[in-house]
Amino acid sequence: MSRSPILLTDEQMKTFITDGFLILQTDFPKEFHHTLTDELNRVYEEEGNPGNNLLPRIREIQQVFDHPVITGALTSVLGPDYMLHAHRHGHHNAQPVAGGWHKDSYWGYSRMRNHHPWWAMIMYFPQDTPLELGPTGIMPGTQNYETRTFDSDETEGEAYASGGAGTFALIHYDLWHRSTPNVLGNARYMLKFEFMRTAAPTVPSWDNHEAKWIQPADLALPIARHETLWEETWNWLSGNVGSIANSLEADDQKIGELANALEDTFEPNVLNAAYDLARYGRRGVETLLSGLYHERTDVSRISAYGLSVAGADAVDGLRAALKHDREETVLHAVFALGELRHLAESSISELNGLLSASSAPVRSAVAEALGMIGGRTNEAVDGLVRCLQDADTQVRFTAGLSLSRLGAAAAAAVPALATALDDDNRYVRAHALEALRYIGTEEAKDILIKSLFNARWCTTTTPANNFYP
């Protein structure tokens, strides 16, 4: 019998918001992890890395993701209707040198990254993983930085997903991380699974008792603090859009200082300036809109983050920016409108108009924004059906995810999703299947079940075990 999810506490959520990760432990007996590690050794030796078939190939792994500690953590961060992405990978590390610091891509790096937790990863270490075995290294608090703000060989402040067999790391998808040296040379597995939010939060989905953000005590991050960003993220996870907008009275001197700070070369400073400007109502929005058009693309991008949390006052200026002749400005404006969700409903027709743009990154951003804004569903679905037929792969699989977020309201897209099940790209097909599942009409379910049965895969058929028994 399944157990109820064990939701994260307020303190754990604060840690996730500030640090970008949590280390979790379950109550599986050690023998469970040891047996699973033995099976991984056998599969990797006989068959190689099963890649996206890791979960069906080693079926015991599903028990891990059904555990109430894991379901509770994912529910807390991504909401109760979170999705397990079709991409999953078993990392095997036996290298005595460290890997490079990186953020995982979204199958391409043109996509603007969300500060709000729309995506997350679980890293599972089935064997005892001391530092000498090369656990994943994590730089706390860096999930919101596009640039690496520390040296490539930086270790000061680095945290490690290290511990006994069955250690789990819940990680903000955009956190800077790396593999560390495996000086023992023994097999070290890290099973990485990705998860996505399919619905914007309307209420807290963790074990919430504190209505307002309260700074964690004794917080010491290696790079910078971001009080306004953290407060806004807490509010967003509680169901509030534009919560910090108009929270401060206009102050000419302060706004001038923040405007200058938008051009700082140290990204954490610019990030703080953008979020602080969002507090100053129309005056702050005007400054951020000027930043959106700045000749430096990095200033434009971070200004868009400020606009994405500045509330309804930002919408008209962002709609105007959709007509700009610089691709990056348009891309950033589309992103901000998507994050403003229902407040940006008036922009849907203009966003659909951009689906004729020559820029695939812009079309992909539109596909995502349409699923996040949600209102005027017929128009949004029409646009997303167009996206399912786009020449660019990323546009097509983003459309499937957005249709999942629209759910039953996207029923008109079912025929187009059925066609997408024959797409050449595995993730377009996977997102189309998920969209059919979340739409959930009888027609959608019939198509879904037929496709899954046609594609069924025998989990025990291997080169060493072809047919019998």
Image (cartoon, rainbow, N blue to C red):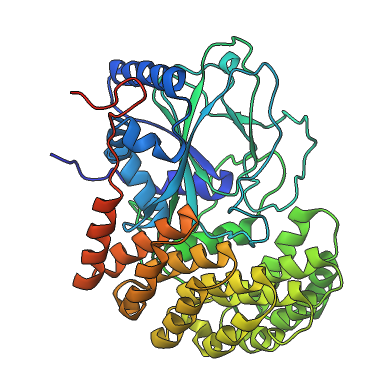
Q: Is residue 156 above or below residue 109?
A: above
Disc tally is: 0
Q: Position of residue 173 (x, y in %)?
A: 54, 48
Report the residue that reaches farthest toward the front.
467
Report the residue that reaches farthest toward the left.
1
Give me the residue at 55% from left, 45% from top: 20
Q: Position of residue 411 (x, y in %)?
A: 30, 77
Q: Nearer the viewer, residue 170 or 181?
A: 181
Q: Nearer the viewer, residue 427 or 6?
A: 427
Quadrant of the image occupied by residue 334: bottom right
Direction from residue 61 to residue 383 in the image, left or right: right
Residue 207 visible in the snapshot = yes
Q: Position of residue 333 (x, y in %)?
A: 66, 77
Give me the residue at 61% from left, 16% from top: 182
Q: Nearer the viewer, residue 402 or 168?
A: 402
Q: Is residue 226 above or below residue 62?
A: below
Quadrant containing the N terminus is top left
Q: Is residue 192 above or below residue 206?
A: above
Give me the residue at 32% from left, 44% from top: 71
Q: Position of residue 242 (x, y in %)?
A: 54, 75
Give me the residue at 39% from left, 69% from top: 419
Quadrant containing the C terminus is top left
Residue 373 visible in the snapshot = no
